[in-house]
Image (cartoon, rainbow, N blue to C red):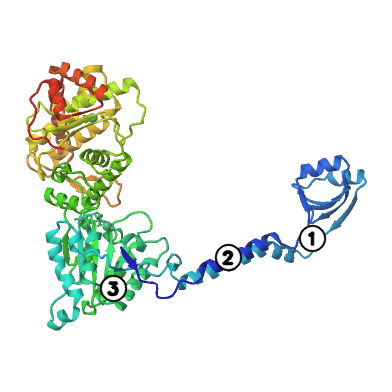
Amino acid sequence: MANDINRKNKPAPVALVFLIGAVILVGATFFRPVAPAVQMLPYSGFMNQLEQENIDKIVILDNNLIEGTLKKGGSFKTIIPYSDPSLLPKLLENDIAVEGGSSGNPLLRIAFELLPWIIGFVFIYLMMRNMQSGAGGKAFQFGKSRAKRYQEGDKKITFADVAGQKDAKYELEEVVAFLKNPQKFTKMGAKIPKGVLLVGMPGTGKTLMARAVAGEAGVPFFHMSGSDFVEMFVGVGASRVRDLFDQSKKSAPCFIFIDELDAVGRTRGAGYGGGHDEREQTLNQILVEMDGFDAKEGVIILAATNRPDVLDPALLRPGRFDRQVVVAMPDIKEREAILNIYARKISLAQSVDLERIARATPGMSGAEIANLVNEAALFAARKDKSEVEMVDFEEARDKIIMGVARKTLVVSEKERKMTAIHESGHALLHYYLKHADPLHKVTIVPHGRALGMAMSLPEEDVYSRTKGWIEDRIVICYGGWAAEKICFDETTTGTKQDILQATEMARNMVCEWGMSEEMGPVAYGQEDEPIFIGKEIARHKDYAEETARRLDKAIKKILDNARIVAENILTEHKDKLEKLADVLMARETLTDDEVRLLVGLPPREAVVV
Ligand code: ADP
Ligand code: MG
Ligand code: ZN
């Protein structure tokens, strides 16, 4: 790991200050100059004492506070909750000596009451000052950059620790060469990139790559996340940027790494809701700082984002982040390489075939692969095995893909039956559609929020899909719905996600992929990227009402056709559907081969994980 070397000044004896402060605080609270052994009586308790004639004498202070002594000894205090006109007659009736009085100088009293608070605040203030000059002070320095300075230590990360990513490494070589020896470049008058933007999906290793650059070049770097700049106090972000750049110049050669640049670098004027003024100020400051310094000083700015499309164009102009390096999702070979890196750190059974695992994890990022190995090791450990086996990887993979398996969830028999029918519907369709991917397995073990799952598995990584495949996919989506309808004559809410998926695919077929004969290969409506994460994607309408109606019709037609195909196939094979569901109820999970055997289909040769 990187070690924080920002500890020039020795951490002050924070603990000691803390201790002294605590002692003062506690002392001030308990040893306030108050007469000893005065008990607080509630007003009702006071009235009780009065009725039982236990009270000796009282002093009424400030109209609502009574101090008094009891006949059997001891003094008390009572607060009168409201002005009680019957009190005084009652007291006199009981022959109690009543005195009026004052609690003394009210200002003094208040001062005494406040004393512990004042001491407390002074103490906290001192502690803050102390921490600011010490190591842990970052939390209180609003205007300071909060950037962590990293220097890769003995176990530094290099490009060798990053599997694959050949292109990205190649592009970053230049940055590394420059950071190693800036003078060499400046002497030659070579143009040096000021800002390099790493672009890639989450978990593809952008942060890892930045650390590897530092490791390769042997220079420190300042790490800050885009969201760190944006605070609730206006002006803080901008001053943090200034501070970050100032600090980095002092450590040149080095680089600044701004992770999640999009948090601060979104197009100006695009946000709604409050708070974006602060963000814009911060962004402006970044632009100003980037213009204001020269790469000759030996500082380069690296940034990472998974949303380059939302970045303010000003950031990408020449002289700023004009160089983009794509950090791609791993393909089969790269997944295997990543698996290799992490599998080396655990004890692996001989039988584990990493290539097969790589093949079974399409679409997983480097981070997910790393997590997969870790989870597999955990599964093995839980079973007290000495080696991690293939089944552990399978379980880990299912857990990651489908959410945590909730085997303990209690599902009623009726619901299980319904789920079994539903999933069997999805599963069976895989065998009767020409373009569908092979089924991987079908299960009624609840995963995440789904009660069951029928998973298919492409035989290789696929980056584009044919019309036939998508049509079949939509049919499979309707498999659950159709099976429920055929076997129970009614459907459940469990079809929601399927219908949503089918509709989304049909809409894309018509509006984006030009796969509808009626509407032709035309893009209808641009998808507005969500400005804030979590917002739905809004389709920007750039067509007439009339066209909108035709679009709806074309989408509906695709969906209707698919639904009918699903119903027809499953009606024809209703016996197999029910048989499959029954076995599924008993065994919970069935693989492709098991399903084939059950419904009387020949086994498939290429068996994947
Ligand atoms: P990002 O910043 O792109 O979201 P990270 O750099 O944080 O991704 O990656 C998370 C983790 O995933 C890394 O710490 C590393 O363990 C693993 N990882 C991702 N890609 C790779 C890779 N190509 N080689 C090795 N490990 C990787
Ligand atoms: Mg990251
Ligand atoms: Zn379903």
User: Circle 3 sits on which residue?
Assistant: 289
Q: Which amino acid, mark 3?
A: Glu
| CA distance for labels 1 and 2 | 35 Å
Relative depth, front residue between 479 and 459? 459
At 14% from the left and 76% from the top, the residue drawn is: 191
Give the quadrant of ligand 1: bottom left
User: Circle 1 sits on which residue?
Assistant: 103
Q: Earlier in the sequence, mark 1 or mark 2?
A: 2
Height in image: 267 above or below 79? below
Q: Residues within 10 Å of mark 1 (few under 14, many from 20)?
A: few
For label 1, being within 8 Å of ligand 2 is answered no
Foreground label between 1 and 2: 2
Q: Secondary structure at mark 1?
A: loop
Q: Residues within 10 Å of mark 2 (few under 14, many from 20)?
A: few
Measured from the top left, where is residue 136 in percent x and y? Answer: 44, 67
User: Circle 2 sits on which residue?
Assistant: 19
The numbered mark at residue 414 is: none
